[in-house]
Amino acid sequence: MTSQIMRDHMKRGLGMPRELYLSPELYERELEEIFNRSWLLAAHESQLARPGQYVTVESGFESVIVSRTLEGELAAVHNVCRHRGARLLDAGCGTARRLVCPYHQWAYKLDGTMLGAAKMAPDFDKARFPLKPVHVTSWQGMVFVNLAEDPEPLAGLLALGEDAIAPFDLPGATVAHEITYDVGANWKLVWENAQECYHCNVNHPELIRAFDLAALGDFDLRRSDDMRVQSARLGLKPGAISLTLDGRPACSLPMLTGDPYTVALHLKPTFAVVCCPDYTVMLRERPLAIDRTEVTMTWLVRAGAKEGRDYDLDNLIKVWDQTNLQDWALCERTQLGVRSRFFEPGPLSGDEPSVAAFHHAYAAMLSEEK
Ligand code: FES
Ligand SMILES: [Fe+2]
């Protein structure tokens, strides 16, 4: 039903129907059918470089521990004890040599192998109670997990963006900064907003100093058939070579060698990356509630770049942090509007083809009829 309503609106060139932002049943389906089956960004590899380093990835009611094992492998396991189900680790990141449940101290290796449990019957077989594994993979220096049983390989999904992203050598980068934003809007409003620059001229004074709105859409736009994956070069104003306040590189160590360009890659609805010649931002998005979305932005620079010497942190993060805050205010304003019983979606403009592409991807991701 939902996909059908959506397709009908799409055919007529309209925005998303109001109910789709507001239905609690649909929200539950989205978590299960979309987010718990999509590749979720866990970390940059540099955040999981040393044995024992871990991060958790939260999605709906699920939580995953992603780590570099003591043997040096990447591992991902459900953050759920095999005894009576307690969460093993609090959400966040840290270092651990093994996972010990705080409740009754069942202990596991980072890859989930069970190490021991006190006072169990003599016939208790440890081998039968490992932590349940989760699919984990690394792509261009970024680590992803997927809760699906048999997910589509990530490398194949993102192949259309690979030749544009690879020259930035993301595996050779390091994290300069990370900000997590709590946005008071449905996750689809956040994605729709990110898909168009109809609003940029008036709302993003910092972004448009270097970003050339006139060049939008002209550059090597590629989309997967289902429109979940999109890659596009971003046009900069004459003389600008990076998305910074003055168009000059914010970091003196380049990530890209060769002719400078800027490119964005999206994997809807969980991940985006924007690579500039001197820095990259990774974006991860997850719904916290029907009207609340968490967005984390991570700024990467060439490994070895030092704050204060090679870059000024404020200058490095300024354009995107300001743009993000402006965008969240717009999303929250729209959330208020769509709650109104009198909201009726109007037609999309000629500057919003990627919003329509997002609608297409959304309809394709929801399973057919329920
Ligand atoms: S619930 Fe984890 S040891 Fe009991
Ligand atoms: Fe924006």
Image (spheres, rainbow, N blue to C red):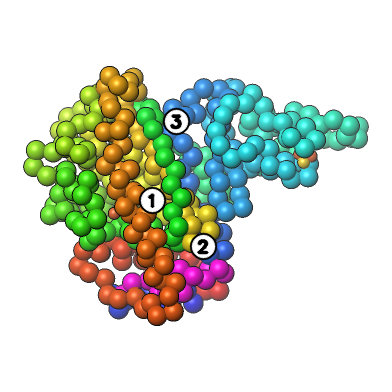
Part of the protein shown in magenta: 14-26
Residue carrying label 2: 290
Q: Mark 1: which amino acid?
A: Leu
Q: CA separation, marks 2 and 1?
A: 21 Å
Asked whether residue 143 appears in the rendered view, the answer is: yes
Q: Secondary structure at mark 2?
A: loop
- The question of residue 5 being in magenta is answered with no
Q: Quadrant of the C terminus?
A: bottom right
Residue carrying label 1: 267
Query: Are dots 3 and 2 in contact, CB under 8 Å?
Result: no
Residue drawn at point x = 46 percent, y = 36 percent: 43
Residue drawn at point x = 49 percent, y = 40 percent: 42
| Residue 101 against residue 358 in the figure, above or below | above
Q: CA separation, marks 3 and 2?
A: 31 Å
Label 1: how many residues lie within 10 Å, few (<14), some (14-19) or many (20+)?
A: many
Q: Earlier in the sequence, mark 1 or mark 3?
A: 3
Q: Secondary structure at mark 3?
A: helix
Q: Position of residue 238 (x, y in %)?
A: 8, 42
Asked whether residue 224 appears in the rendered view, the answer is: no
Looking at the image, residue 285 sits to the left or right of residue 258; the answer is: right
Residue carrying label 3: 45
Q: Nearer the viewer, mark 3 or mark 2?
A: 2
Q: Furthest residue to the right?
A: 122
